[in-house]
Amino acid sequence: MATAESVSASMTQSLVDNVYERMFGDQGQHFDLFEGTASTPGGAKVIYLSTDIIVGIYTAIEYEAGEAWTVILKSCGKRWGKRVLSALEKELRTVANRRFDALTVTEYVVLIEKYFSYHGWGRVSFRLDGIEQHGILQIDLKDSIFRYALPQVTGPVDYMVAGMLVGIFEQLAQTELDVLQMEVKTNDGVALTHFLLSSPERVVWGQAQADAGSDYATVLKEMQQS
């Protein structure tokens, strides 16, 4: 028999899930068939795109800028991340009448995870353990849309996502941040991208270790001790 606490927790989770669905899912979107537009509860326009757009952007930038495509996409991602945070704050007020500064850390993290998943970037998960002690936020990305669209590219491809993470969390932390990304293969051969978000100085140190051939666990340990 369910306890009052379990029923209450279940209802609360149901309400939370409903908020996310209204913020990010089709349920909360307004479709104007005459205009051919879709918009969020907060009034932001929604654009549905195929992976062809990613292939086209990558091909054009790589042709024009060579290896600098990574820097360009990361820079674009950072600007996009700041816009995302502003839009999410507006949507949260509209749908749930809540402010960002009233969210707990866990609620904030889950909100960002839901955003990435619903918008098709991939499945993002955060590890908060050790962040206060070491000043490093660990983030994993599975089912990356960039890896799906760019299977022929060797090495990490999620530079726009990396920039978005910087843009989003710089606003929260109110300090300059940078991110290191390393792509590995899981035991079943699936690509998994690790991100380490921290101060620019610590990220430079970690990148040097990665460039020297250190694996993810070693790079993380070196960054924690730097």
Image (tube, rainbow, N blue to C red):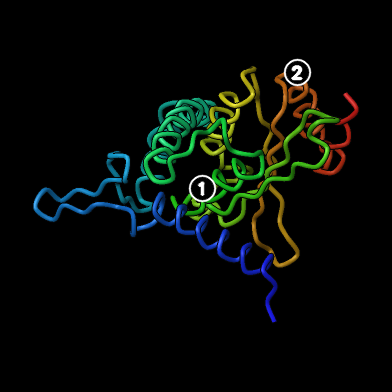
Marks 1/2: CA distance?
27 Å
Q: Residue at x 40, y 45 (%)?
A: 54
Which of 165/104 is in front? 104
* Location of residue 138 (image quadrant): top right
Taking the image as shown, residue 146 lies to the left or right of residue 56, namely right
Single out the residue that lies furthest toward the bottom. 1
In x, y percent, where is residue 177? 65, 22
* Image coords of residue 17 (percent x, y): 50, 58
Relative to 108, 61 lies left or right: left
Q: What residue would you read off at disc 1?
A: 116
Label 2, residues with CA under 10 Å away: few <14, some 14-19, many ≥20? few
Query: How busy is the neighbourhood of tag 1: few (under 14 within 10 Å), some, or many (20 plus)?
Result: some
Q: Which residue is mark 2?
A: 201
Instruction: Looking at the image, tell me whether mark 1 or mark 2 is earlier in sequence order.
Output: 1
Q: Is residue 56 left or right of residue 120?
A: left
Q: Is residue 93 above or below residue 172?
A: below
Q: Amino acid at mark 2?
A: Glu
Which quadrant does the C terminus fall into? top right
Element carrying mark 1: helix
Across and down, in percent, residue 53 comes to 35, 46
- Most extreme residue toward the left is 34
Q: Secondary structure at mark 2?
A: helix
